[in-house]
Image (spheres, rainbow, N blue to C red):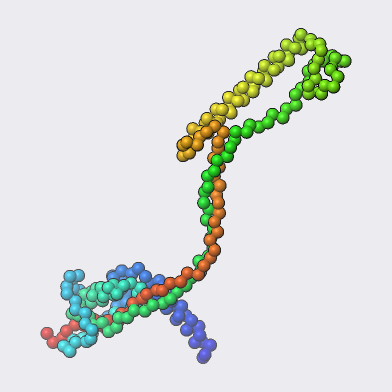
Amino acid sequence: MLPMKFPLLFSSLASALALMFLTGCETVSSTRQHYRNYSSVAYPKKSADAPMPLLERRPSRPHEVIGRLKFDSQESEAFMYRAVEYNAREAGADAAVILELRRTEHPWERWVPPSTTYTPVTTTLSQQTRPVDRRTPRPGICEPGEELSGATPATRICRKDDKEDKEKREEKKKKERDKERKKDKDEDREKKRRRDRRHDHDGDCDRGVDYVTTWVPEYHPGYMEHGVAVRHWVDALMIRYTGR
């Protein structure tokens, strides 16, 4: 028989703890579920503004117990009194006898797991340095034996230039200059477009400045959180006077 008692004991403790921490945020009307009717007669309800005496002990005047309200809650003491008055009016009682109203405190603790938050940090990145043109200069067109001695292939100079070849070279250079100017205009247009889009960084829209957002992580270690849960317990009888 002994092994059978432990599962029942653990089950009862689990139910009590669940009731203790899950019955918060109650309303006065919801406490009606804790009322137990002792009378076979259904008495008419009383209005919400009807006076309802709350007694500390059973009166000497003849009376009968028509019901009982017994529950606990994490609400305030004033809430418990309102719950007794509400159930007494709903049951049609003439008065309520509060047998017990006590306050209990239950310490609790829970583990808060670690977490990581990310904070955006915006910085500027200079883009004034243009990419280096690493194209190798092409040598000039020379007839065999017409190079200067000691000249490198990139700086080759000819003593004699053919007129037709010279015109071709000039035309080619012009095309390259036009291409470079077009490239510079495209870059300036793109930078202007970027500056126009940066409305949230007024005053920092200098040429060649761009903005980079970096998400900086911040680690928060876990910790044990402690607290105290306050609960109130009430036990009240609903009575009606007899011998009227």
- Camera-side residue: 211 or 53? 211
Q: Residue at x 56, y 27 (%)?
A: 188
Q: Residue furthest right?
A: 145
- Camera-side residue: 127 or 214? 127
230 left or right of 192 in image:
left
Q: Residue furthest top?
A: 163
- Camera-side residue: 110 or 63? 110
Q: Residue at x 58, y 37 (%)?
A: 126
- Return the x and y of residue 234 as percentages of the image width and height: 31, 79
Q: Residue at x 45, y 80 (%)?
A: 13
Q: Is residue 102 visible?
A: yes
- Return the x and y of residue 205 as percentages of the image width and height: 50, 34
Q: Residue furthest left?
A: 244
Check the image and report above or below for 15 versus 196: below
57 left or right of 158 in image:
left
Report which quarter residue 15 is drawn in: bottom left
- Return the x and y of residue 202 as percentages of the image width and height: 46, 37
| Quadrant where the image shows the C terminus | bottom left
Check the image and report above or below for 222 versus 234: above
46 left or right of 33 in image:
left
Q: Is residue 91 visible?
A: no
Report which quarter residue 172 is drawn in: top right
Q: Residue at x 34, y 79 (%)?
A: 103
- Return the x and y of residue 183 as percentages of the image width and height: 62, 25
